[in-house]
Image (tube, rainbow, N blue to C red):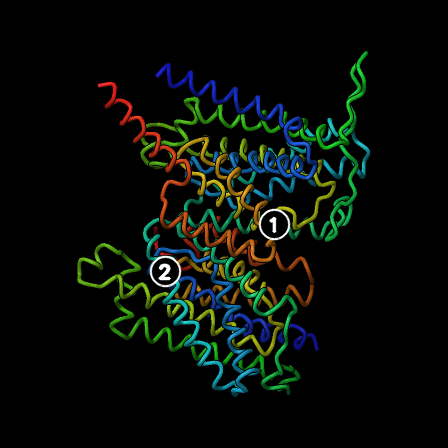
Amino acid sequence: MIGEALLQPLIAGLLTGMTYVLVALGLTVIFSIMNVLNFAHGEIYMFGAFCVYFLCTLLHLNYVLALPAAIVLVGVFGIAMERICFRPAQGDMLTSVIVSIALIWLFQTAAQLIFGGEPRAMREFLPSTVSFLHIRISQSRLAAGLISLLLLVAVNFFVYRTKQGKAMQAVAQDRDAAALQGIDLDRLGPLGFAIGCALAGAAGGIMAPILYIDATMGASVLGKSLAIIVLGGVGSIPGAAVGGLIVGVVESYGQRFLGYPSSTFPFLIMIIILLFKRTGLMGRKA
Amino acid sequence: MSRKTAWAAILDAAIVAVLLCMPLIVRNYYWLGAITFMLVNVLLTTSFWLVMTTGQVNLGHGAFAAIGAYISAALVAVYGFSSWLSLPIALAVAGVVALVIGVITLRITGIYFIITTIALAEVVRIVFGMWEHPFGGLVGLLNLRPPTPIALPRLPEIRFVSKPALYYLVLVFVLLGVGIVRRLHRSSIGLVFRGIKESDSLAEHVGVNTMGYKVLAFVVGSMCAALGGVLYTYMTGNIQPTSFTMVQANYYIVWAAVGGLATFGGPILGVAALNVLSELLRPVREYEPIIYALLLLVAMLLFKGGLMGAIRRIWDSAGKIGSKEEA
């Protein structure tokens, strides 16, 4: 019985953590390639959720088709955002921070005006639950975790096995040296933004059938993903994965046993880890 | 040089004179209230900017405003202190908290520091939201009484109920706070701040105690933020966990950057320009953030150096034309 009480939050936390990993990974990919910390990343997540919602309710698309369609849409949106807003600010961190703050206002208000202030709920994609070893997990949560895992494996493959991915790693290590080797930064920037935004959009789309959807849903996700990438090490893919899972599990236990105060935990873990290792768990030396 | 300083002194005197006469010029209490808020924002933004001159962007600036506001409000409303005793206590507490947090976190730099301070802001918001007694939990402290009247011997009692009285009270404290920031910025200490921003390691190699200077800027900036928070409670009569969040700190960075980060006057100009803009956009309230955001994007991507930078360029080119005519 006690085993169940301890195991249930662990499984739930790992599954939620997988979607956090997606969002945080998107943030860290954009940061390592463009040197931009996109504070509007949570709004991209919200955008993904709304895309899935409208594809399913207005166009009556099946969720299985709507999710990839939404991911592509958000990815294309990311390319446009890079071209219009972030490329002119390139190199200057402060300018890009302020630009992304402006984007938060823009996207949130636009979403509020277009979709209304009321939170919306989608019909659950898989309404039943699975149980094994006396642990009950809803099927949609399980599916969310598995789809996230699949996407993570795909991104990992892209970054470590393909030529473009290796070029991205090179840029993350040293922009100037990478440019001198003939890597076209103007092509890699949009690619990084497309992947980064697509990941956030995917997470939003995955959570759409589970959570309420509204214009401000991105804010809390942004805070968590910032905490995740810092505690894992900014720019590190394994770091984002480990960080996301840690935050997911700790938050899950916290909510089970403590309630409201547990929302400080992602930040407290982050600050504690920063004090002992200034580059995060798996970050390179600055 | 002396001519330049003379002009600067005249400009300062003119600004102070206009500020002193403001309640006589602006008869509409709504507008006077808006101007008073603007003054509080000037204090919050310049103190935010002071910390920035050492190269550290503190998005937790609002957290210190919240600490100041909460402590002063709770001491008065729950424990029955006088406003004029609770104000220095609130500032002292904020200063001590800033000292402790600064010593711990100012070792972290760059993007890591920004995110740490976001975390700080969130933690402070959540902690005040949990703290029922004396801080009122998620609801906060509402219907606070105006600041305690001051009774001077053989003079009528000074009450802070009417808008003009509150305006003057806020003005005095804001001038004090902004004056301290300016004094610090223009002193040799301010020069060291900018040196640390240019190159932290170089400053350390020539024997500057960079950590000490950063902590100094952080503590002074945070105490000014706390003062701003206290003034906010005088204005609004309430304080809630959501009054000062990271969203608020976003405004400080935006105001400062739009005004121009290079000079002391830039952030003040930015606050004035953008607060006026917000007021002008009030009729189309629901579209306000969109218009604000679009203007901000244009300003950031097309006009580097902010409003102050643009004014300087115009001033310099006008100066060149003038000197040509003389020659």
Q: Secondary structure at mark 1?
A: helix
Quadrant where the N terminus of chain B is found in the figure: top left
Residue B125, given in percent of the width and then of the height, sits at 64, 50
**Residue at the image point whose x is 48% and y is 59% from the top:** A40
Crowd rating for badge 2 (residues with CA inside 10 Å; few <14, some 14–19, many 20+): few
Residue A188, given in percent of the width and then of the height, sits at 29, 65
Q: Nearer the viewer, mark 2 or mark 1?
A: 1
Residue A235, given in percent of the width and then of the height, sits at 38, 60
Label at residue A84: 2
**Residue at the image point whose x is 67% and y is 49% from the top:** B241
- The number of discs equals 2
Amino acid type, mark 1: Arg
Mark 2 and mark 1: span between their CA atoms? 28 Å
Q: Quadrant of residue B320?
A: top left
Q: Is residue A254 left or right of residue A54?
A: right
Using the image, name the chain to which the residue with label 2 belongs.
A
Quadrant where the C terminus of chain B is found in the figure: top left
Label at residue B104: none
Amino acid type, mark 2: Ile
Q: Is residue B106 left or right of residue B327?
A: right
Q: Residue furthest front?
A: B325
Residue B200, given in percent of the width and then of the height, sits at 36, 37
In terms of depth relative to the viewer, which is nearer, A261 or B60? Answer: B60
Q: Is residue B309 above or below residue B156?
A: below
Can residue A250 be seen here? The reply is no
Q: Secondary structure at mark 2?
A: helix
Query: Are the two marked residues, 2 and 1, in contact with CB atoms closer than 8 angstroms?
Result: no
Q: Quadrant of residue B176?
A: top right
Q: Residue furthest left?
A: A181
In terms of depth relative to the viewer, which is nearer, B228 or B203? Answer: B228
**Residue at the image point whose x is 50% and y is 22% from the top:** B12
Instruction: Identify the residue under disc 1.
Output: B282
